[in-house]
Amino acid sequence: MTIRQLSETLINQIAAGEVIERPASAAKELIENALDAGATRIEIATAGGGKTLLRVTDNGGGMAPADLELAIRRHCTSKLDKDLTDIRTLGFRGEALPSIGSVARLSLLSRRAQASEGAEISVTGGRVEPVRPAAANRGTVVEVRDLFFATPARLKFLKSEKAEAAAISDVVRRMAIAFPHVRFVLSGSDRATLEFPATGSDRLARIAQVLGRDFRDNAIEIDAAREGVRLTGFAGVPTFNRGNSLNQFAFVNGRPVQDKLIWSALRAAYAETIPHGRYPVAVLSIEIDPALVDVNVHPAKSDVRFRDPGLVRGLVIGAIREALAREGDRASTTGASGLMRAFRPEAQHPPAPWSPAASPYRPFETAGAAAPHFSERQTGFADFAAPSARSEPAYVPSPAAPRDEEPQRHPLGAARAQLHENYIVAQTEDGLVIVDQHAAHERLVFEAMRNALHARPVAAQALLIPEIVDLPEDDCDRLVSHAGEFSRLGLGIERFGPGAVAIRETPAMLGEMDAAGLVRQLADELAEWDTASGLKNKLEYLAATMACHGSVRSGRRMRPEEMNALLRQMEATPGSGQCNHGRPTYIELKLSDIERLFGRS
């Protein structure tokens, strides 16, 4: 078989299969070029989900006519000279424009600031037309029409216009978060206009534009550094979570990335604070020496490889956990919003007018009796509570019980009542808090058990006959190197000849277990992340189950001092804002919200 050189058009079409997978890929490449050109205003217009039309207009530095001729050739770029280890721009491969031009109808219109006129060049299915003069504003306009018309087979793999338009919107949102000083406008016949005005250095304001005001109200700032790697950004409190991972954003040196190491670290940081199937909301930005990260993993440039992945993963987990311990126990504002919606009367079903005859509780109905005078001491809900409809009377504090004359200066306030033997109502300085007593105490018991678990070695039970597990030599080496760590957790392993380890002890807490399966799981974790948390997670899961069954049950009546003691302990315990299953333990309602419910503000 004769070997021959492929044509330039065919080479570009092959490259387009990797670089330009869908209209969103083309949008990403063109927006990156505009940002690298120093643009402060970028406008994106689409039609047909980007398949019919994709136009990107910027006010960047522009290109000269000679630059236009080179821009549509492969591996021609102004962003890279000789060194692949010092990449400080978003683009650098010089493949995007020739790849797009080989499968679509591409036109570039550009003018430099000092030039008297602009220039335009067109590429149709790989066929290049000569550069011609054209009227143009400063900057560049790149227009892509009929994407993949030259490779119709690729069109069959695209999704619906609505789905492709949504993918482009996601690209613009990620770029907008990464570059808050740039104004982005996304419009077209296939969408509603999306605009992100520039916010300068106020990154949280830009994030609020993209993710909504709720994120700003529920975000915790992150700023940590370790060995030359810096992590900044914002993470939502655990009770502010979503049903998918679309609201998780990661950037490396300003580049939006989809990196499994970062997502794994984010999941680990929120472990035991978010329910299963829910996802945290976070925006993380990693700044690292370009020589310590490889962005040339794939032509799409969405994957990166860190020279020291363990350092980056540890930094992400440690920084987020420290931030959650510092501020993560506050209630999500979305809980208060839901509470207000529940309290708000429905306009279509107005409540029946109140009358004394219809009221089951008429404290002033005694004939000839004057209305009683309420002293200033009567401030708690229990003082005005109606008798319970249950067979047992509702709990009312006795006169001898200690009472708070004013709301205590504590974040969770002073207990005022217990509703349905499950919910504690506490009064704060500027509102009220409703606490789920079972969920709150469950978390407190679990934290106490976990602290005891980590304070001393876990009790181990010796196996009568050691279990031999055959593993690859590399896995055996990794396991034995962590044998000391496993021993503290009750797992005793040692080398047993070539390609095998012997299990001599297992944690007593776990009882009968699949020890060989656990060791294989630990070996896989060590190979992937150089850390093994599977055994620790199993022990903590057991502790969480024991805490669930050993905490204050729903339906138990609590004395005022018990309720206040629970509130004070919650304030002193990290992570008490969520139960072991990730559900919120309390909801806070501000006094201003209550006043709005009654139309007083």
Image (cartoon, rainbow, N blue to C red):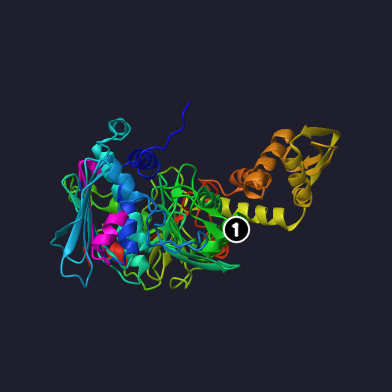
Name the residue furthest top.
1
Q: Quadrant of residue 542?
A: top right
Residue 126 placement (x, y as % from top left): 28, 42
Say which residue label 1 marks: 314
Q: Residues within 10 Å of mark 1 (few under 14, many from 20)?
A: some
Residue 121 placement (x, y as % from top left): 21, 53
| Magenta highlight on residue 70 | yes
Residue span colored magenta:
47-71
Q: Quadrant of residue 566?
A: bottom right
User: In screen coordinates, is 534 left or right of 41?
Assistant: right
Residue at image coords 77%, 45%: 477
- Residue 379 appears in the figure: yes
Residue 330 placement (x, y as % from top left): 46, 62
Residue at image coords 46%, 32%: 3
Up/down of 143 relative to 84, above or below: above
The answer to which of 445 and 266 lies nearer the viewer is 266
User: In screen coordinates, is 83 left or right of 451?
Assistant: left
Going by the numbered disc 1, the residue's amino acid type is Gly
Up/down of 468 relative to 271, above or below: above
User: In screen coordinates, is 183 left or right of 400?
Assistant: left
